Amino acid sequence: MTYTAWILLTASLVGLSCGIIGVFLILRRMAMMADAISHTVLLGIVTAYLITRELSGVHMLVGAIIAGLLTAVLVQWFHSRGVQQDASIGVVFTTLFAIGVILIATQVGNVHLDVQHALMGEITFLPWNTIHLPVIGDIPKATLMLIVVFLVVLAFIIAFYKEWKITTFDAGLAASLGIPVVLMHYVFMTLVSITTVASFDAVGAIMVVAMLITPAAAAYLWTDRLSVMLVLSGAFGVISAIGGYYLAVWIDTSISGSMAFSTGILFLVSFIFSPNHGLMSRVVKPYTTTE
Amino acid sequence: MSVLAVRDLSASYHKNKVLYDVDFEINQGSLTGIVGPNGAGKSTLLKVMLDLHPKLSGSVVFFGKNLSQTKTRIGYVPQRGSVDWDFPTNALDVVLMGLYGKIGWFKWPSKKDKALAMASLEKMGMADYANRQISQLSGGQQQRVFLARALVQDADLYFMDEPLVGVDAATESAIMETLKQLKENGKTVMVVHHDLLTVEEYFDHVMLLNKTIVKHGRTDETFTKENVQATYGGALRWMKEA
Amino acid sequence: MLDMFFSPNAQWVLFSALTLGVAAGMVGCLAYWKRQSLMSDALSHAALPGVIVAFMIIGTKHLPLMILGAAVSALIGAWLIQWIQSNSRVKEDTAMGIILSVFFGFGIMMLTVVSRSAGGNQSGLDSFIFGQAASMVRTDVYTMLAVAIIIIFTIVIGFKEWKLFLFDVNFAKGLGMSSRLMSTIYLLMLVLVIVIGIQAVGVILMAALLIIPAVSAYYWTHSFKAMLVLSALFGGVSGVAGTVISTMGNGWPTGPFIVLSASVLFLASFLVGARKGMLVKAIQFKIQQRQHALEGGRQS
């Protein structure tokens, strides 16, 4: 495959995985939790690096899962002790992120890991860092990790589809039916963490938030069916990723920044033109309401 | 026959004790209204019994067993306001959720499940709205969907949290009709209720609750002026005069 | 290292970090009770494109104009969050997430373009991401101080109005206060404190200086006045401590150290803070349990 094809494939995988996870994030009102986890994952990666002194996919995944779960647990813990939910998120993630940045600045130096990279991603370098697999041949490490993560996410979402649906819609009923709501919550946080860390290399910490939240929010405006929303959100993620890449090439700028910007454009278009929930629909038929 | 036995139940919300020494039994085939002032712990009582809120002390026994062994025999209808009605799903799908516990892990709802859910919607007069997005339903219709979801669970013991709040008169009578049918079929129903004027008409048993049980028993014996006054304190005066 | 305390420029930087911390602590306290802690996070990210675009237009690093740019872009962000929420079924947290990440992405796009044409980090724009207090020059410090002092003054003279506004908007309206005006002033203060803070703390962590001191103060007191004072104090101490620590290493960013100082104060508050602190809570719970056991024992 060509250099550009690898980049497009990697970016599309980011869009797809983030788009799917994002649907449940926004329906569970956890958009800002995604923002928090995307920052704290940095601490997980740095810590994993400091312990093992190497930046391998597996170490990064484990570090990210621990950091993500730690964030979720701490937020819940402070919240249950009287701190407002969003203030609790704010305290936890800024602190963990600050520790991560300080560790990079003081311990790691600018050798293998730098803050710039973590924030903005370096998708342009990805195709050169490859691994050889039987049958398939050479494949960029980050792409391989994204494929694995995407398959895991997809498997979890499909296998527990109705459980995700009910715990998201009505946690009280779900618990009374014997579905382990708390366990599902932490499994979900784990999925968010691995998706984030796998996308990290490609788009960086803050732009991954754009990929997680914005395509899902756009899809939310087009449909009233959860399954359709999942498909649309994944598709929007891919479109933004590819569109963002060409936008970046065109004006010669940051690829991850352009991808985040593209998700915003897609959302804006949806916000204006969506047939049922868009601005235009209100202007065109302002009097049609429910019976 | 007792289907529910609660002993010395206590619970707190943050620092405040909201329930203490709650002790009662419920017999099969009864339709009980739980009545009390705001903050009396009515909703919390349901949640504590179902383990959705932690208890400080006490025990709850369903059908002579503990909760985990009897989950499929219990139906719970949360307050309508407790869920996000903008969720992308339709009425039929919400009713189907009542079956998720029985369907089990990894399996998808079958045609038979869908037929059951549809029949249940029909019972609540909502068959025409099966495919409608739930935010496009009126408050009364949403409550009917919740009731249909409880019916499809085919439980033996139902807990309902304020099912008559914010619904139209037609829905209110449809829901009460359904509850009476449940009772006639030998099911047991406990309903958190807020309207003192309709207690005598709707329920054969009443539980007067204000953090602890003031009185519990048959409505005609229990729902007296003195007992209600003891539950509500001074706040009642203007209600009775109205 | 002690030299820095004697150089007049360093003294000014420290003094402005102190004032910034105090202002942020106070505004953060208002944000906490408006339940908008994360709004400050969204707005500080949304300020980035404004800084860069202002720089692109004027061509040099002129702080007052860049602050203006940041303020405009953060206000647009705030307005969009409101607009998205009130015109669709998208909820507040999602709207904040969208604005935060898309604006930041746009900012990074612009920053990359600028860095390329202006020759890398020459423009010093990178310091807006993580904060570099040492990069501030005298005029920057004056600008920051002036804005911070206006904010502190606005909160102090309107103390009882703010209290009423946060506690019971409808009652405040009944007394003839304009909640619209109050909301506008509040939003302006929030945006201003963010934009003067981003050079020292950076856009990513500026929110921490608004959130953490207020939450820490909450553990010590039930009085709004005391909370405001404590929050200001915690903010000020964190600002100074973080700035001092960051000068100990070569090229250490200021923002993360300010945040970490605030976090240490938070942990201390959480563990030993009066009334609501962990220790007190643990003791209270034990007493409650014992009382409960005693009562139960008596009855059976």
Image: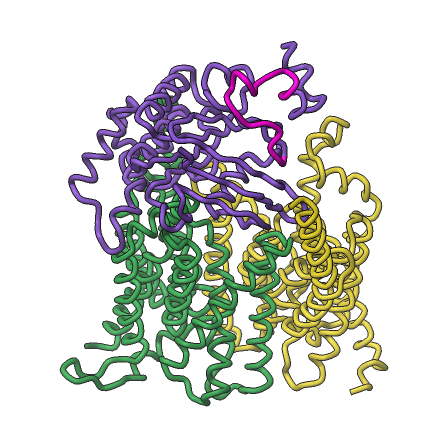
Chain colours: A green, B purple, C yellow
Q: Range of the magenta residues?
A: B211-228
Q: Position of residue C258 (x, y in %)?
A: 69, 71
Between C191 and A141, the residue placed more toward the observer is A141
Between C143 and A220, the residue placed more toward the observer is A220
Q: Is residue B223 magenta?
A: yes
Left or right placement of residue A220 versus residue C195 in this view: left
Between A113 and A242, the residue placed more toward the observer is A113
Q: Position of residue B62 (x, y in %)?
A: 42, 42
Q: Is residue B193 above or below residue A29?
A: above
Give the residue furthest to the top: B241
Q: Is residue B85 above or below residue A290?
A: below
Give the residue furthest to the left: A135
Q: Is residue C6 magenta?
A: no
Total marks drawn? Answer: 0
Residue drawn at the location 42% of the way across and 73% of the way down: A121
Q: Position of residue C180 (x, y in %)?
A: 67, 35
Left or right placement of residue B227 versus residue C233 in this view: left
Between A287 and C278, the residue placed more toward the observer is C278
